Image: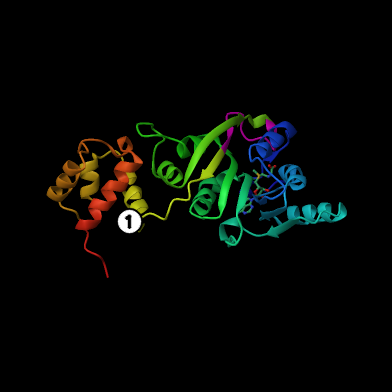
Amino acid sequence: MYKKMYGQNFLIDNNIAHNIVKAANLTKDDNVLEIGPGKGILTKIILPLVDYLICIEIDTKLCKQLEYFFASCAIKNVKIVNYDFLKYCIPDNKKFKIIANLPYNIGTAIIQKILPISNWNTAIFMLQKETVLKLTANPDDKNYGYISIFTLYYSDCTILFNVSAKCFNPSPKSTITSSVIKLTNKFSKPPDPLFFYFIKHVFSTRRKTILNSICSFKGLQKQQVRKILDNLKVDSFLRPNQLSISDFLKLTEEIKKYIIPQI
Ligand code: SAM
């Protein structure tokens, strides 16, 4: 019985599973976190290659099956945690790699939880191709938005390969392709709290010019915004999706000077 609400499309292609794990360049010194091990297709490949593996799985029945399997093989370097990853408190004492075929409905939420953490170094994720296009989009691309900037701020992201719907059971609609990506942590320091708040705002008004979009942010005056844009040599008629991450970082710094701190 598959639980659709948990995004349970299990990978059944062993070659793909091996290629996903291979992309993480695992060594015997590695600690690995796997999100949503499911029936364990990736888990069983990862285990002999690493020092320790911790798996977070929301489905109690799948956890029991995995625990039974590993106990019966006397495999000890694995811990199965029956928990919702979105509520899970990630230990911050050890460096780790992450491997996951993510439940598509919460893929972006999981990415947003992981990326700001400082003790992961490499992550291999399989997600729906549409989501991956948003994560990796550049300015001027229709997919470019908040999550592209968030991903780029914290990581270098490379698309590795696509996976067809036929490689899963149950198979998603044949039109749904998945993509595997590799993220490398840039260890960026947390940005000014205004930065992502501001980006969310401008992309919620993405059809407006950047001038008008900023004017509707925190009550800034048109004159002030024109001055900021002129100083930074940003054309006020550009749309938000034409600005780079460095433009947004500079804009945040300038805008901050005009915003009265709220008590
Ligand atoms: N890794 C397996 C594979 O490749 O076949 C399963 C992948 S399946 C796409 C996603 C898995 O994530 C399922 O096993 C599902 O139960 C689990 N899952 C869904 N939501 C979760 C959550 N919030 N926390 C932890 N696991 C979750």
Can you give x and y, in whole percent of width and height, for residue 257 in the image?
A: 21, 57
Residue position marked by numbered label 1 in the rendering: 194
**Residue at image coords 40%, 43%:** 149
Name the outermost residue toward the left: 223
Query: In the shown orientation, is residue 136 left or right of residue 124?
Result: left
For residue 231, above or below residue 253: above
Look at the picture and state if 142 lies above or below 26. Answer: above
- Find residue 127 and report its image quarter: top right
Q: Is residue 74 positioned above or below 138 on the image? A: below
Residue 8 x %, y %: 66, 45
- In this picture, which residue range is highlighted in magenta? 167-181
Would residue 115 be found to the left or right of residue 242 on screen? right
Q: Position of residue 208 (x, y in %)?
A: 25, 40
Q: Nearer the viewer, residue 228 or 184?
A: 184
Residue 176 is at least partly visible in this image:
no
* Left or right: 77 as drawn, with respect to 209: right
Residue 160 in the image, given as x and y percentages of width and height: 58, 32
